[in-house]
């Protein structure tokens, strides 16, 4: 676009220095492509970290949001917000659960879940409720959610942590049983169906089913953080649905508003009536613009069959990555390619942060998480041709990085 002004100085001296940023500033996008302020084009395989469900400048989302902005952006929760009921009904239908609380971000959705679990405990006479959480989990950056997070780097410097968490490894039912044996204070288990920041680590379907049974037997809330893996990314609306279970509490955010901040906590019957008026709230939560974004995102996903697209293009992308990296997989320099649908991780046997800039130089946006896992969480509109392009750019870079100094 000719209106782009050249980027003189990418550093922002007045913005607090909390991110290791690339020297890139994006100006606009179309579908799965974005352009920086210098006019360079990139294929977006990161989707704003699993946020831009419908890609950029979607031809039906943008006019709907424009219409909403011209009517009302924010009212407030002193009044009814009609689109809250529309979006809640839709989330209830898609999840098989029963009620929704709206907020604006993932950590806020998780905070609400943690508060629900504690109040669930207090309501049945447990004064010091405890919640089971997992190694390598990521639940957000507030004091409570970073305490639930299983990454010492995220916690360091912010102690004392919130108490009342018991941590276990994923996919190990015996560890869970041992850690919780004879403990009457446990009220909930809290986990991601597929860990995102932790390195794209899926919970096994058998484990999820066993855990559901244990939660029922011991009257625990099953709370599944679907902030990253939910909203169609894996080819089902919610990743836990592959195990044919239903949680009691499900935080959502990231992809729910296709870029507009929307968070939600969906609750099943066991958790739907724990909060009473005055127990919880959020000024921005459920505002008319956010609700419209959620409603239209889901509508367009249904109209365009994006769950099926995520499943088929994701499966093809995974197979193509495995084929292109077969030699590396055979010798273990690529340990595994994990994930489902359009949530994939390529786990390398060495740190690979350098790939992010290298890929950007070649016009591809990706991320690296857990030091050595390339993460691909593109918009759910990704085409097969675009998936092939991801492989063509990325795999030679991975192969070259592995060959360096070895
Ligand atoms: C991103 C993420 C969060 C935090 O969401 P924010 O909107 O950044 O607060 C929580 N849980 C999971 C699984 C996430 O991926």
Image (tube, rainbow, N blue to C red):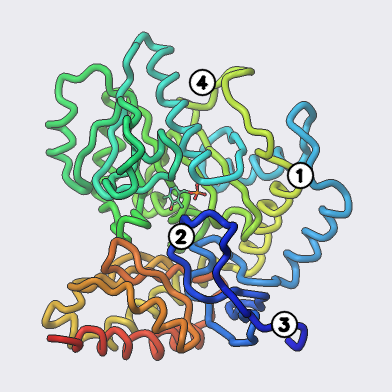
Q: Is residue 113 above or below residue 10?
A: above
Q: Which mark is residue 19?
A: 2
N-terminal of the pair, mark 3 or mark 2, is 3
Q: Which mark is residue 143?
A: none
275 sits to left or right of 210: right
Residue positioned 54% across, 76% down in the render: 24
N-terminal of the pair, mark 4 or mark 2, is 2
Q: Tag 3, which secondary structure? A: loop
Q: Separation of disc 3 and disc 2 at Cα?
A: 24 Å
Q: In the rendered image, which quarter contains the N terminus? A: bottom right
Q: Tag 2, which secondary structure? A: loop
> What residue did someone put label 4 on?
274
Q: Which mark is residue 4?
A: 3
Residue positioned 24% across, 71% down in the render: 351
Residue positioned 32% across, 16% down in the render: 128
Q: Separation of disc 4 and disc 3 at Cα?
A: 51 Å
Q: Separation of disc 1 and disc 2 at Cα?
A: 30 Å
N-terminal of the pair, mark 1 or mark 2, is 2
Q: Separation of disc 3 and disc 1 at Cα?
A: 32 Å
Q: Position of residue 343 (x, y in %)?
A: 41, 65
Q: Tag 4, which secondary structure? A: loop
N-terminal of the pair, mark 4 or mark 3, is 3
276 sits to left or right of 110: right
Q: Tag 1, which secondary structure? A: helix
Residue positioned 71% across, 38% down in the render: 85
Q: Separation of disc 4 and disc 2 at Cα?
A: 37 Å
Give the number of the mark in front: 4 or 3: 3
Q: Residues within 10 Å of mark 2 (few under 14, many from 20)?
A: few
Q: Which mark is residue 288?
A: 1
Give the number of the mark in front: 3 or 1: 3
């Amino acid at each position: 676009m000719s209106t782009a002004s050249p980027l003189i100085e990418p550093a922002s001296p007045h913005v607090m220095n909390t991110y290791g940023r690339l020297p890139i500033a994006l100006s606009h996008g179309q579908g799965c492509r974005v352009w920086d302020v210098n006019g360079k084009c990139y294929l977006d395989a990161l989707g704003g970290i699993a946020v831009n469900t419908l890609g950029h400048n979607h031809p039906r989302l943008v006019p709907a949001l424009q219409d909403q902005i011209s009517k009302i952006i924010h009212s407030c929760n002193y009044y009814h917000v009609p689109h809250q009921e529309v979006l809640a009904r839709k989330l209830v239908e898609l999840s098989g659960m029963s009620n929704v609380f709206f907020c604006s971000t993932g950590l806020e959705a998780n905070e609400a879940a943690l508060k629900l679990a504690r109040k669930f405990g207090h309501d049945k006479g447990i004064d010091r409720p405890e919640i089971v959480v997992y190694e390598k989990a990521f639940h957000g950056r507030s004091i409570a959610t970073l305490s639930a997070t299983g990454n010492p780097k995220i916690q360091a410097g912010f102690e004392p942590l919130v108490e009342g968490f018991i941590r276990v490894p994923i996919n190990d039912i015996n560890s869970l049983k041992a850690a919780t044996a004879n403990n009457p204070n446990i009220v909930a288990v809290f986990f991601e169906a597929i860990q995102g920041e932790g390195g794209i680590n899926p919970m096994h379907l058998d484990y999820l089913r066993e855990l559901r049974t244990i939660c029922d037997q011991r009257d625990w809330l099953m709370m599944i953080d679907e902030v990253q893996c939910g909203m169609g990314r894996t080819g089902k609306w919610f990743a836990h649905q592959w195990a044919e279970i239903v949680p009691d509490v499900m935080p959502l955010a990231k992809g729910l508003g296709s870029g507009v901040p929307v968070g939600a906590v969906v609750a099943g019957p066991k958790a739907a009536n724990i909060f009473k008026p005055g127990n919880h709230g959020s000024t921005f939560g459920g505002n008319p613009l956010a609700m419209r974004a959620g409603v239209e995102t889901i509508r367009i996903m249904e109209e365009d069959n994006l769950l099926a697209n995520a499943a088929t293009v994701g499966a093809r992308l995974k197979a193509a990555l495995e084929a292109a990296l077969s030699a590396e997989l055979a010798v273990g320099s690529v340990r595994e390619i994990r994930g489902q649908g359009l949530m994939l991780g390529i786990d390398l046997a060495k740190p690979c942060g350098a790939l992010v800039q290298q890929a950007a130089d070649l016009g591809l946006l990706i991320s690296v998480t857990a030091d050595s896992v390339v993460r691909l969480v593109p918009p759910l509109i990704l085409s097969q041709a675009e998936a092939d392009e991801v492989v063509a750019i990325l795999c030679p870079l991975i192969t070259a990085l592995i060959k360096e100094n070895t």
